[in-house]
Image (cartoon, helix red, strand yellow):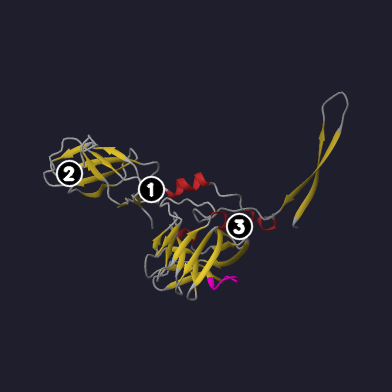
Amino acid sequence: MAEINKTIQLKQTSNEDVIHYFPVTRWDSVENKPSLSTNNILHNWDFTNPVNSRGLTTYANIYGYTIDRWACFTTNNGSLQLNGVDGITLNFPDAYNQFLQFIENPHIYLGLTLTASVDIGGNIYSVTGTMPNQMPTSGNVDVANLNIPVTQSRLRVHIDSANDGALRCGIMGTATNEVVGGVRRMKLELGSVSTLATDPPMDFGRELAICQRYQLDIRGRRVRAYLIYPDAIHFALSLPTTLRITPTLIGYPSVYTTNTINGLQSGFSFNISSPVNSAGQVVITASKTAHGLTDAMMIFDSVNLAMLDANL
C-alpha cells in the first residue's frame, strides 16, 4: 500500500463541544515517499556561488585544484571559467580531460548504490551505479557512467586504483576542443533516485567550513614568533578548523623584525614543522643559519597565493 489515509478526531474543551477532523497521510515506506532532498556526498557543489579560496574567475592551463575541493586536469591550454549564476564553463582541448572531486574514505560506500546528477543549463542529467563490494587493487573501475546528451562529455563516478584509490565524481571529456558550458550544480547521493531538483540552495557558510578542512587561504596573515633558536624561528598560525592532515605550505611568507617598515629579512626557508596541535594551530618554521634575530614577524602577502594545502 503506497499510502494510508486516516482521520484524527480532536475534541475542543470549552462550554460547547466542537469536533474537528483533520485528514492525515502516512507513507508506509521510504520508497513511496515524495521525492525529498538527500545528503550530497560532494562538497561545494553549487557552481553559481562556489567557495573559491584561490580567488580566480578563470583557471587557465590548469592541471590541479580550482574552486575549493574541485580539480581540473586539462592539457593544451584547457581552462575553467566562473560565470556567476550561469555556473562554470569547462574548456577541454583533449579527450579525457576531467573536472572532478576526490571523495574521502571511499570504503564506507562499498556495496552501496550511488546516483550522480548534474545540472547543465537548468536540465538535470543523472546516472546510477553500484559500488564494488571491495576496493579494487588494479585498474580503473567505473561505478557509473553517462554520456551527457547536450555535450560530448560523460558524467562519471569511478575508482582509480592505479593512483590513489580515491573515489571520484565529475565530468570527463570524450572529444577534442570540447566546451561544456552552463554547469550549475552537481550531486552524488545514496540510492537510485536523483534528488538534485529538490535540493535547497547550498549553505555557503557550511560549505566554507567544510572546505577549510582541506585547504585554508592564509593571505594577509601576520604572526609573531613564539620560539627562537639560533638557526630557526617558530611561528604558530591559528586555524579556524582542524585540517584533514598536516598541510603543505603553498607560497612563501616574509620574515621581518618587529619593525615591519624597514625590517625585511632574507635567506629564510619555510616548512610545516609539526602537525596541528591541541590549541588549533599549525607551526611554521623559518630556517636560516645564524639569523641573529631576537624577535620576528612572519607576514604573508595579501595578493599572492598563500595556502595551507591538505587536499586529497
Question: Can you tell which quarter of the image residue 224 is in?
Answer: top left
Q: Quadrant of the C terminus?
A: bottom left
- Examine the rendered structure and indicate whether residue 108 appears above or below residue 286: below
In depth, the one of 64 and 265 nearer the eye is: 265
- Mark 1, Cα crowd under 10 Å, few <14 / some 14-19 / many 20+, is many
Task: Please give the residue where the numbered disc 2 appears in the rendered image.
Answer: 232
Kindly identify which numbered label has been placed on residue 188. Answer: none
Tag in front: 3 or 2: 2
Question: Which sits earlier in the primary sequence, circle 3 or circle 1?
Answer: 3
Q: Secondary structure at mark 2?
A: strand
Q: Whole-percent x and y of residue 167?
A: 45, 63
Task: Please give the residue where the numbered disc 3 appears in the rendered image.
Answer: 196
In depth, the one of 223 and 142 nearer the eye is: 223
- Residue in the picture at 38% in, 45% down: 242
Q: Secondary structure at mark 1?
A: strand
In depth, the one of 216 and 107 nearer the eye is: 216
Residues in magenta, as a range: 147-153
- Residue in the picture at 43% in, 63% down: 72
Task: Please give the residue where the numbered disc 1 appears in the rendered image.
Answer: 216
Question: Which sits earlier in the primary sequence, circle 1 or circle 2?
Answer: 1
Question: Which sits earlier in the primary sequence, circle 3 or circle 2?
Answer: 3
Q: How many tags in the picture?
A: 3
- Mark 2, Cα crowd under 10 Å, few <14 / some 14-19 / many 20+, is some
